[in-house]
Amino acid sequence: MVMISEPVEAQIDAAFDRHLERVRAFVRQPSISGEGVGMEAMAEMVRDAIRGLGGSAEIVPTPGWPVVSGAIDAGRPKTLLLYGMYDVQPVEGEEWLVSPFAGETVDLPEIGPSLVARGVYNTKGPLAGLINVLETIQATDGRLPVNVKFVVEGEEELGSRHLPWFIQAHRDRLGADATYFPFYCQDRHGKPHLWLGVKGIQYFEVRCRGGAWGGPRTRGVHGSNAVWIGNPVWRLIKALATMMDEDEQIQVEGLGDGAVPQAEDAELLARLARTFDPVTELWNWDADRFKYDLRADALLRRYVNDPTLNIDGIWGGYTGPGTKTLLPHEVRVKMDVRLAPDMEPERVRERIVAHLRRIDRGDLEVEFEEGYPPARTSVHEPVVQALVRSFRSLGREPEIWPTIAGSAPFYLFRRVLGQPFASGGLGHGGRPHSPNEYATLEGMRLFERSVARFLYEFAGAGS
Amino acid sequence: MVMISEPVEAQIDAAFDRHLERVRAFVRQPSISGEGVGMEAMAEMVRDAIRGLGGSAEIVPTPGWPVVSGAIDAGRPKTLLLYGMYDVQPVEGEEWLVSPFAGETVDLPEIGPSLVARGVYNTKGPLAGLINVLETIQATDGRLPVNVKFVVEGEEELGSRHLPWFIQAHRDRLGADATYFPFYCQDRHGKPHLWLGVKGIQYFEVRCRGGAWGGPRTRGVHGSNAVWIGNPVWRLIKALATMMDEDEQIQVEGLGDGAVPQAEDAELLARLARTFDPVTELWNWDADRFKYDLRADALLRRYVNDPTLNIDGIWGGYTGPGTKTLLPHEVRVKMDVRLAPDMEPERVRERIVAHLRRIDRGDLEVEFEEGYPPARTSVHEPVVQALVRSFRSLGREPEIWPTIAGSAPFYLFRRVLGQPFASGGLGHGGRPHSPNEYATLEGMRLFERSVARFLYEFAGAGS
């Protein structure tokens, strides 16, 4: 028996065109944390939306971008902490079908009518949809089935640099029964993916510059000098080559130390392997094949338990048109490690430093950006089960993944606030961090219905 | 007994401010062949300057940028083919003290008053200076001591792509006793470097893109997918790492095949090692040390005889601000090989292809830009000896280098037209292909005097 408010769902369908306008308004406001574009205006838009629901809301400064914090006390026994983000990735260097901040509808081949915009999937679309749902419930049923609190950060795409500070400083007023992160979680065939965990991340940059070891110190010089002067790019390439083998197996000793498969995963992975759809996953990520020729169960074990060492970008020397010859003075590479449970960022940093120290010949520098550990909730937690039932009641059996490959700072909710968490809702989108990020119109409507069901279901669930 | 025209040299000194204005005019006109900026206007400026000397001159189209071709028949027994270039390197991504196309004077620390501009050293400054000299001789002595022909190309910085075509097509009217390339050849302490040869070059680009082997095919995807999808950047790094060892010794089998030390070099190198100034060379190239810890004679042998494999630039993935996580779909590297005598570009291309084929796993592409072989003139050629005497007569003993590390398509003059060649004149400049390229004002004046002496000396030299 699933708890449904039929008037709420009827109203979601009836008012959907208006609801879509809120999503458009959210994505039309650029909010690129990495470039400092539009952040204040976006924070105000989120704050005003919460106030529009009758909640308290404020923009709380941090040493970086502020957190929008708020609460709606519905006088209910249960409280849900709603976590979200109002920042998005840059679009620099990307080619789009439409302007990434126009909020335009495109009928995408194989996908259908969709909003194509930076952040529509990751994750201003779901955030706007959640607000639509709360507004609809209030207008239709009078009050929310649960009390809600909001933590909407502006630095998720920067590795949530100051969220730890915010959560620590405000932990007294962030108490709740669980945390929920809204997200479109159906693949393009409609199957919902339900993730019980997120990986941690440690972002860093490695540089090689000319210096006491040799190489040009402050400027690129004529390329013919390669005959007798060292090239920082060759130095970095030789250094990077020691970190990975030909089959992309990590060669940094102990990088994965602390990674421990979770007890309930054996059963979860066995079940997941039966419904896992490799063709759709490869389509999602624009690839012809996986890195490993493995059966589904073995591949998924690696997906869940392996650390990664990725190169996000590399650049140095002359990269323009034509054929300039240059001996560059500097080359830089952006890298990130994804942490599986129960890896710790401190240990990862130590291992990277130890590796670089071992191979360094006075030519390498490393700078770490903030990192955070992974987080995990058991499949048996009431908040997870409420989400599962909300999907099933709409005819969608979720495919349960022990973790997503991506990262979010849910350790703050799990470890610091002691709350189980769940994330997702029906709906479909794709191409996060890529050109032509999208979410389907039909999926956005379904998302709102599924979130409404989840809220009622969680309100009624035993804890 | 050196041939000097005192009226000419007095007039060079007297009119030097006006002469400088021609240099300024040349560098103020951008002419970036790699970007197609200002090329037509620059070609016209050179053509008009030759016509201003009473010569015939025309802009000869090629499939790329045109060649400015001209001649002045002074009714003399000897003819000198004047080779020059009117194109310059891009300035994209560089930071300059002054606008690179303003032709401004800067009093550079440790250097003195200089024009700081793209092309002032490499090589529109010397080209303008040469025209000043010819004009002064005509105005003072009535006619030139030698007939001259001009070949001024617009693709030197692109590897002289169509100069072979031009020289072949027009070889009948390019006959001369020798080729001369004007250049400022003093180091910052005043010592002239006289190069008997130039290296060849083979420029190329290597790419790794997602494809049948794996990796994202058409767009970067979320970096978390590194857990199961291959990264083209790692692939390229592992491939490049096979081409070079930790000490920057080339690992491409047979790349240097054909390199043969020239017979007269043993004696030339022994003499060069006695005056070679490593401190100034390192200062020129902004480096603290050479790639090798070798004595001067051994270092110079490598400088002259070693092939090089340089990385000019590398780029792929996210290179903007902040910490975007991305699994890139493509990475590219620009590289060049410098060819020592008697290496051939065809052989170099074969060796690179063979190496890449050996290590390729369906993930590498290579594209060759045009290349050309090295060229060399004996120190005993009259044109070289005329240049040596012109320096000595101005109190400067030249340091003779068997070859410069850089490249120029002099094989066309040597092999196709059968002419010995010489290059250089007094004068000092630096930072070619770099920000704040410069030439000193005092050096430019000295350049004109030395070129005047060279022309008279060559006219009188036995051949």
Image (cartoon, coloured by chain):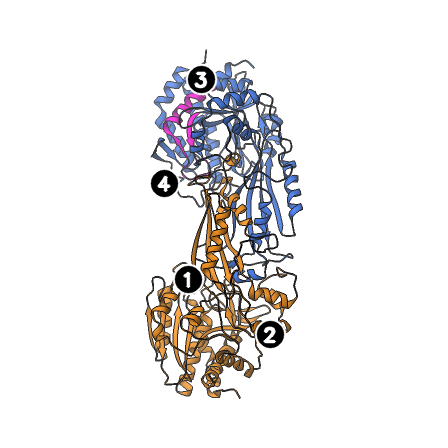
Chain colours: A orange, B blue
Asked if residue A412 is positioned above or below residue A354 in the image, the reply reads below
In this rendering, does residue B136 appear at all?
Answer: yes
Q: In the picture, residue A46 is in which quadrant?
A: bottom left
Question: Label for residue A32?
Answer: 1
Chain letter for mark 2: A
Label 3, label 4: how many angstroms apart (C-alpha)?
35 Å
Spatial CA distance of label 2 from label 4 is 65 Å
Q: Amino acid at mark 4?
A: Leu
**Start-end of magenta stretch:** B426-454
- Both labels 1 and 2 in a single chain: yes
x, y (%) of residue A291?
A: 61, 59
User: Residue A265: horizontal and vertical position, in percent?
Assistant: 57, 72
Amino acid identity at mark 1: Ile
Residue at the (55%, 20%) spot, across then down: B267
Residue B97: assigned label: 4
Mark 3 and mark 2: Cα distance apart in space: 88 Å
Of residues A256 and A94, the one drawn nearer to the viewer in this rendering:
A256
Question: Does residue A349 sit above or below A22 in this rendering?
Answer: above
Q: Do circles 3 and 4 both sit on a common chain? A: yes
